[in-house]
Amino acid sequence: MKSRIRLSLVPLAVSLLMAGGCRQDMHNQPKYRPLQASTLFADGGSSRPLVEGTVARGLLQEDEAFFTGKTGNKLVAELPFALDEQVLARGEERYNIFCSPCHDATGSGRGMVVQRGYRQPPSLHDERLRTAEAGHFFDVMTNGFGAMPDYRQQLNARDRWAIVAYIRALQLSQHASGAEIPGGDPAAVQPAPAQPGPARH
């Protein structure tokens, strides 16, 4: 009986020895939490400002046209990179998620939140917006405009440009001339003659 009791105490003794070996010197050292007050620095804060000119890796953003939609004070007229099917598909996906609730799937400005009382945006098919530079749409998505908030946190720069490309596709879908439609102008195509139905007996 005594031997059983001794054996049952062995794991407890081992656990106590292991716990005693866990030192928390680093854990318990003096430290400041972010934004905690400090008497060490003259400004009274523990967090130090970044060294002037510091740029996080990958955020140098030297390409002004790509990251602002402008060159100097002038809006860029076209996308700052080549347009392909993949870019357009990405733009459609992002537009449907972030833009269609207000602008609707066609860009007319009658999205679901507008139908429920939110301020209606202008139609993307208005002459003013159809002739606007590509940089205008990028700038609005980046900085917001009127009732529209900015989307710089939700959408990276390339996705904002992809949406610009898709907006252009939406505009073209409503205002393309017959010469711009592959296969010719649908309005000029004669309807196929009606096929006779099966004979009835």
Image (cartoon, helix red, strand yellow):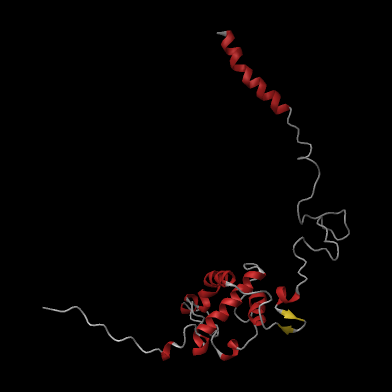
Q: Is residue 31 visible?
A: yes
Looking at the picture, tell me which residue is in the foreground, 146 or 174: 174
Looking at the picture, tell me which residue is in the foreground, 184 or 64: 184
Q: Residue at x 60, y 14 (%)?
A: 7
Q: How many marks?
A: 0
Q: Quadrant of the C terminus?
A: bottom left
Looking at the picture, tell me which residue is in the foreground, 85 or 137: 85
The percent position of residue 114, horizontal first and vertical second, equals 49, 79
4 versus 167 height, above or below: above
- The quadrant in which residue 66 appears is bottom right
Q: Residue at x 55, y 89 (%)?
A: 126
22 versus 8 height, above or below: below
The percent position of residue 5, horizontal first and vertical second, equals 58, 13
Q: Quadrant of the N terminus?
A: top right
The percent position of residue 200, horizontal first and vertical second, equals 14, 79
Q: Residue at x 47, y 87 (%)?
A: 184
- The quadrant in which residue 134 appears is bottom right
187 versus 69 height, above or below: below
The percent position of residue 108, horizontal first and vertical second, equals 50, 83
Left or right, 66 with reference to 37: left
Q: Residue at x 49, y 77 (%)?
A: 104
- The quadrant in which residue 76 appears is bottom right
Q: Is residue 119 visible?
A: no
Looking at the picture, tell me which residue is in the foreground, 130 or 50: 130
Q: Residue furthest left?
A: 201
